[in-house]
Amino acid sequence: MSKFKVKRLTAHILMLKVINDMLKYSFHLTLTQVKLLNLLVKSDDLKAKVPSIDCLLKLNEIESKIALFQMLSYLNNHQWLSKQRDQRDQRKLKIALNKNHMNKIEYMNNEVNDYIERYFAQYTLQTTSDYVNYLLRCKDLLERLKCYLNICQLTLEELYVLGILYLHQGQLTVKELQVEFHHPIFSISPILKNLIIKQLVQKERCELDERRVIIIIKREQFSKVTKLIHACYNYLEKGIQDKEK
């Protein structure tokens, strides 16, 4: 498997983590909320009716009407949209975006778009200028990929570590691996501990310098790890291509 494909896979996992944090700390939003806001913007641009509650519930991440109402209330309280009862039918909820809301959403989208273009564009699986939409599609795919990894008793973070090790011929020192973790959201110690328990990697002392500890993908597991990474990459690539059609 080519190293660039592995780099692409790890870059998508990192991109999702980084943007999640960016939204959380800079805008106090989640990607699900961003997806909802962009759906409302799209409806406004098309001069279409605001999607119904049932339509909004079709967003896979929103579990129930209660969860959706809580999300809409949060976005209303933080001035991302306006929410009020329909005067003609008090049972219905009216959701609207004014100019200030639109400008605020546009600014947030531009910040995310610029960040992805600067740091991750070279690894995307599709030529696009709308990186926010691309990110949301990748999020859906990676959420489904988590289900497959759960069957394999792995997490996305553990897949990321295995990918980084694979890129370096299956071994790195602990210090080198920590450097590869560009984003502080990854806590390396518990991830390594879990991979060791799962007998996918092991720690060894460097023969040339025993002060250095090396993390190695176990030789007998290398083929299994390679197939796993390859399967995950193919799933991501096919998912992006299918969504283009």
Image (spheres, rainbow, N blue to C red):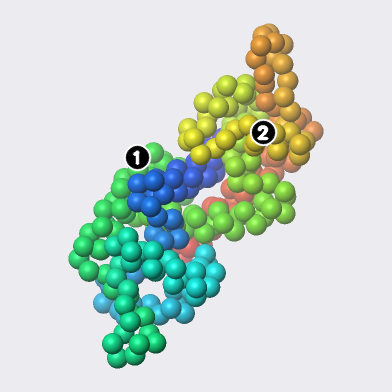
Q: Position of residue 62 (x, y in %)?
A: 51, 68
Q: In the displayed structure, does residue 143 sit left or right of residue 217?
A: left
**Closer-to-camera residue (17/229):** 17
Nearer-the-camera pick, 78 or 217 = 78
Residue drawn at x 63%, y 42% is 159
98 displayed left or right of 227: left
- Numbered label attached to residue 175: none
Which residue is the site of mark 2?
192
Quadrant in the picture for residue 228: top right
2 w.r.t. 243: above or below: above
The three-letter amino acid code for the residue at tag 2 is: Leu
Circle 2 crowding by C-alpha within 10 Å: few under 14, some 14–19, many from 20: many
Q: Amino acid at mark 1?
A: Arg
Q: Position of residue 95 (x, y in %)?
A: 32, 75
Whichever of callouts 1 and 2 sits on the residue coming sooner in the sequence is: 1
Which residue occupies 22% across, 59% down? 103
C-alpha separation, residue under disc 1 versus residue under disc 2: 30 Å
